[in-house]
Amino acid sequence: MNSPAHEERASTRGAIRIDDVVKIYDPDGAAVMAVDHCSLDIEAGEICMIVGPSGCGKTTLLNAIAGFHEITSGTITLDGEVLCSSAKPRAEPGSDRIVVFQNGALFPWKTNLENVAFGPTMQGKLSKAEVTEKALGMMADAGLAGVEHNFPGEISSGMRRRVEIVRALMNDPKVLLLDEPYRALDSLTKSVMHEALLEIYYKNKVTIFFITHDLEEAIFLGHKVAIMTTRPCKPKKILTVDIPHPRDYSVLTSKRFRELMEETNEAVHEEALKAFQAGEKEG
Amino acid sequence: MATGKFNLRSLARGVLSIVVFLILWEIGSRSKHWLGADVFSPLREALGAMGFKKTYLPWIGAVPAPTEVLHAWRSIITDAGYWQSWYMSSFRVLAGFTAAMLIGIPFGLLLAVNRTAFGIGFPVFEVLRPIPPLAWVPASIIFWPTQEMSIAFVTFLGAFYTIVINVVGGAKSIDVRYFQAAQSMGSSKWDIFRRIILPGTLPSIVVGSAVGMGITWEVVVAAEMISGGGSQTGGTGGGGLGFFIWNSYVGGSYEQIVVGMISIGIAGFISSELLRTLGKYVTPWLRLR
């Protein structure tokens, strides 16, 4: 792995291997296959973007890694250790894999600071004063100075997302699992959030498993982009983005970015069309 | 929802509406003097001829005027018995309501978090819930050794069901992502209960207790009327505001009936306002919405 895209990655932990994973939902005996023999390798410290139409089964994969849902068969390992397999269908949720949810899951009854401090407080690794100090430091780093004592409901949705990412990083995770975190944001806020995420990433070098349906977002952020088929979900095309990090927004207008967009657009559109037609049949 | 901001114009509107209401009421009840006592007698006779009872025609003239009510109020405002009625009703409401909170909140939480408890407890709860608290009055009088306890028990029932239903509903509607997030970050079961379920249910507890408090006042007054207001304890004041109204009716003091009614209105308003303030204090994150 000596391609230029990987040079700046120093992380040695957080490698995820998804091997032949199948997930069949069985509501009322009608077996629905959500994930179909899906295999995917994510290297330590890599930003891996999972692109696919809504409802294709991407989130099922994320839930399996996080330990929220069971898998039917296959194996998922993190740094060589089995998270879940046929023998142990459900992974144990843990602070080495933290999810940032689609619509956000900051606790509304806790201030932003209390939210950010939640993980280390629960784990009891640090004293209260140390936790607060670390939380304040990380919030300041992420441009969140001044909102520490506000409730999540008092700040903008873009800021809330940032608080949630900081809350996740406070756990010192190996992997960040992001489930369309910027879906509800307007495109201007989104562009700011992308650069902010990269900035946070360059400081923390954590593996990122990022679900989106936005191809532009995927290519801009990712080292690797996995385009998934619509339900059942498996990789249709895996693209290595050879634009060097650190990136900023000028990348979006570069020639290489355009080429990569063109290369993948067709595949994404095809799946979106399939998903749409399937939706019509069901509806 | 109130804007929370002090608004002079809406205050003026509120005052105006009350003043107009009082004036219309005053005019209405004095109308019998102006019109003469029997201005409606031909109509009554006609109705009588059609087979109706002659007294069936309602008219606001039978209601004492606000000035008369005020006068009656002034004459009893120094009466210890009147304040004793306030005290008794408030005490019963507070006792029943507190008991409903102390029993209802843990019970509701237990039903919400434990599937076995829910399976066993909820069906019984749902069968008993539709029985109006007032239907419990006779059974309650038989069961409890003192009149006082039976009234407190019925009052308790009034708030209990509402509180339990709200707690169960509130706890069950907490977003699953909060549990998942807390679990990922290493929370124990106890942490999840204390830091997710309790605060997540708090808004519903506040709503449930506000509604429950309203029902408590309705119930206590009716229970006092039906059970004779614990009047065996002696004195006129032992019966509470409900018995005060009933007693005024029996004694033919119609002004005092209205005094009693307004007193309950004020008492209910004060208790809701206190609860609302307390509710805002314990759920500071909801103030911003």
Image (cartoon, coloured by chain):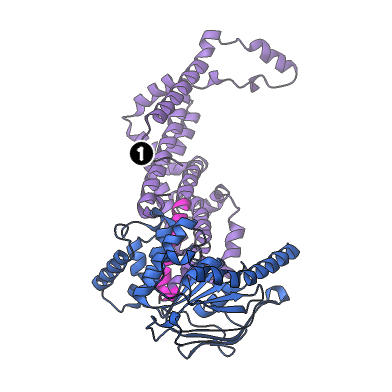
Whether residue B194 is visible to the viewer of this picture, yes or no, is no
Please state which amino acid type lies under the numbered disc 1: Gln
Q: Residue at x 38, y 33 (%)?
A: B7
Main SS of the magenta part reads helix
Which range of residues does the magenta coloring cover? B183-208
Chain B rendered in what hue?
purple
Name the one closer to the observer, B260 or B97: B97
Residue A11 drawn above or below residue B187: below
**Where does the image place residue A196, in percent across and percent down from the top left?**
39, 65
Name the one closer to the observer, A48 or B165: A48
**Where does the image place residue A7, in percent across and percent down from the top left?**
40, 82
Q: Which residue is drawn at 41% across and 65% down?
A: A195
**Where does the image place residue B253, in percent across and percent down from the top left?**
46, 25
The residue carrying pointer 1 sits among few (fewer than 14), some (14 to 19) or many (20 or more) residues within 10 Å by Cα, namely some
Name the one closer to the observer, B20 or A78: A78
Residue furthest front as drawn: A255
Mark count = 1
Residue that carries the numbered disc 1 in the rendered image: B84
Residue B287 drawn above or below residue B69: below
Determine the image quadrant of residue A244. Answer: bottom left
**Where does the image place residue A135, in percent across and percent down from the top left?**
30, 68
Whether residue A247 is visible to the viewer of this picture, yes or no, is yes
Chain A rendered in what hue?
blue
Q: Which residue is drawn at 43% across and 64% down?
A: A249
From the viewer's perspective, is B44 left or right of B94? right
The answer for which chain carries disc 1 is B
Q: Is residue B184 magenta?
A: yes
Q: Does the magenta stretch include residue B59?
A: no
Determine the image quadrant of residue A86. Answer: bottom right
SS under mark 1: helix
